[in-house]
Amino acid sequence: MIEPKIIFEDENILAVDKPSGLSVHSEGADATGTLVDWFLRHYPEARGVGEPRVGSDGVQLERSGVVHRLDRDTSGVMILAKNQPTFDHLKHQFKERQVKKEYRAIVYGQMKERWGTIDRRIGRSAQDWKLRSAERGARGQLRDAVTDWECLKSGTYEGEPFSVLKLDPRTGRMHQLRVHLKSISRPIVGDSLYAVGQISRSNNLGLRRLALHALNIEVELPDGTDRSFAAAWPEELARAETLIA
């Protein structure tokens, strides 16, 4: 399996750099090949830490240590809790939106402004209930979602426009960054869920993955100290960025 890189650990937490292609946990009974599976092999004493969660098939998911999650194809920094008091401490911060997160993404098209905010509620897609939508026609319960963005670079490659963005989500909705960027017609390069049409027409900067990375996360540890953990911009995304001129 693809394994994460350990960034930091102590008796309470483990901060890792999760590679693209590694699921955080399984949606079925078989959890082999997931981040949680790897975590429990190395830290079996953490089994059961967290909140019970049942999947769509009615089977309880193995989510030991998982305080927050990244999509399978998103890379970057994640924090896992080794014990229940630490889980509760961190989970409260996520719930109260006290955690600072910074992402980096490469999107199709050029941004017209240097920075901005996407403030659009997210619901279910009218075309596919498994997907989310921040556009007109979204169904189900619409949840508030806010993303601040800054354009770090814009240009073209082989005549096609691209932009590199810094993203600061103020909320933590499922697929929030992917859905918000799609809603302003700037979907993320390589997004097989929300940019199917663009992928088929684009050079995709030569990438075969989602161009989204969790760069930094800042939390308060159980001892009261604030700590920031960073995962370097992956080499394949850095190479793609250099192509934009």
Image: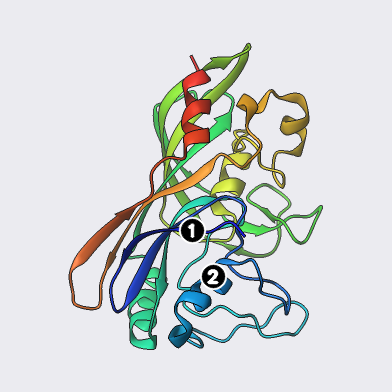
What amino acid does circle 2 point to? Answer: Trp
**Mark 2 and mark 1: span between their CA atoms?**
9 Å
Task: Tell how many labels.
Answer: 2
Instruction: Please provide percent x and percent y for residue 157.
Output: 58, 16
The residue beneath circle 1 is 4
Question: Around disc 1, counting alpha carbons within 10 Å, would you say few (fewer than 14), some (14 to 19), or many (20 or more)?
Answer: many
The residue beneath circle 2 is 38
In what element is the residue under mark 1? loop
| The N terminus, quarter of image | bottom right
At x 39%, y 27%, the residue is 114
At x 61%, y 56%, the residue is 72
Foreground of the two, 117 or 212: 212
Foreground of the two, 115 or 175: 175
Instruction: Please provide percent x and percent y for residue 87.
Output: 39, 80
Q: Residue 29 carries which label?
A: none
- Is 227 displayed left or right of 235 in the figure? left
Instruction: Please provide percent x and percent y for residue 66.
Output: 49, 73
- Is 231 displayed left or right of 207 in the figure? left
Instruction: Please provide percent x and percent y for residue 73.
Output: 61, 51
What amino acid does circle 1 point to? Answer: Pro
Does 152 appear above or below 210? Answer: above
**CB under 8 Å between callouts 2 and 1?**
yes
In what element is the residue under mark 2? helix
Does 54 appear above or below 204? Answer: below
Q: Earlier in the sequence, mark 2 or mark 1?
A: 1
Q: Which colour scheme is used?
A: rainbow
